[in-house]
Amino acid sequence: MKDAEDGKLVAILPQFVVFEVTYVLQASSRSALPLTGRPHPGVAGSDRVTILLLAIALSTSAQEPKKRAEFKDPAQMCDTPYALCIKAPCLKQRDSNNLYPCECVMQTGWNMGPNDCDTRRTNLTSTYSNNFNDGSRTVSCAAPTDWAWCYGASCTTDPKDSTKAVCKCPMITSATLILVTENKCPEKSTICRMLWSGALPAESKFANDYYFWWMTSHGHQSEAPAKACPVPDSK
């Protein structure tokens, strides 16, 4: 399947399903089934069952995750340089614009974010990918927790380290999910007291699921969505 121009988010599964089902029909009977659902004289009963099962399997697996009502920001896939802030620590030192500096990591490749791809090629932006999910878990911090909303933030390359970027992010106070290295899960209380780049729970799920779906649907490798930290044993 060919990527859409500039990585725009498009629904490709319906066309894929139609192509696959039509191919099986033509291979079995050299003609397509009528859309009325009546048995086609050139297709045996067992073939019709196989075709039906194939159609069901294709229509119910690997579907595009639905965008939650809470996810109000635009999302476009681009193959560009970007700053990845999904595990970024931030300083509680706001500037004159009420923004907080977060230490993010420079990346190049497919990423999901606002603005068109040409703009993101020339203006370093904090966007999303699943690149750090392997070996990581999510910590759930209850409200009220201070966290940095870095998605779409403007960034600059760190003058002291070209592999890092400094992104200026607004601070939000609410419940949040924070991505941490798996061995940090027992330190939840400490983590939730610090300022980290985070996300609203519903938006975090959408971003994880959508990015993984888009990448794998377009033939790219992607780390699976990160799982939550295990609940501590109450004993």
Image: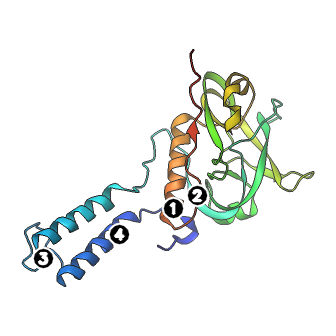
- Kindly check if marks 1 and 2 are in contact, taking CB atoms under 8 A apart as contact: yes
Kind of element beneath mark 1: helix
Colour convention of the picture:
rainbow
The amino acid pointed to by label 1 is Thr
Where is residue 129 drawn, in percent x and y? 63, 53
Camera-nearest residue between 187 and 165: 187
Q: Nearer the viewer, mark 1 or mark 4?
A: 1
Q: Give the spatial CA distance, label 4 vs label 3.
A: 23 Å
Q: Residues within 10 Å of mark 2 (few under 14, many from 20)?
A: some
Task: Mark 1 or mark 4: name the one nearer the start of the chain.
Answer: 4
Which residue lies most toward the bottom here? 30
In the picture of the structure, the residue carrying the numbered disc 1 is 216
In the picture of the structure, the residue carrying the numbered disc 4 is 15
Q: Nearer the viewer, mark 2 or mark 4?
A: 2
Which residue lies most toward the top here? 235
In the picture of the structure, the residue carrying the numbered disc 3 is 43
Task: Mark 1 or mark 2: name the one nearer the start of the chain.
Answer: 1
Q: Give the spatial CA distance, label 3 vs label 2.
A: 40 Å
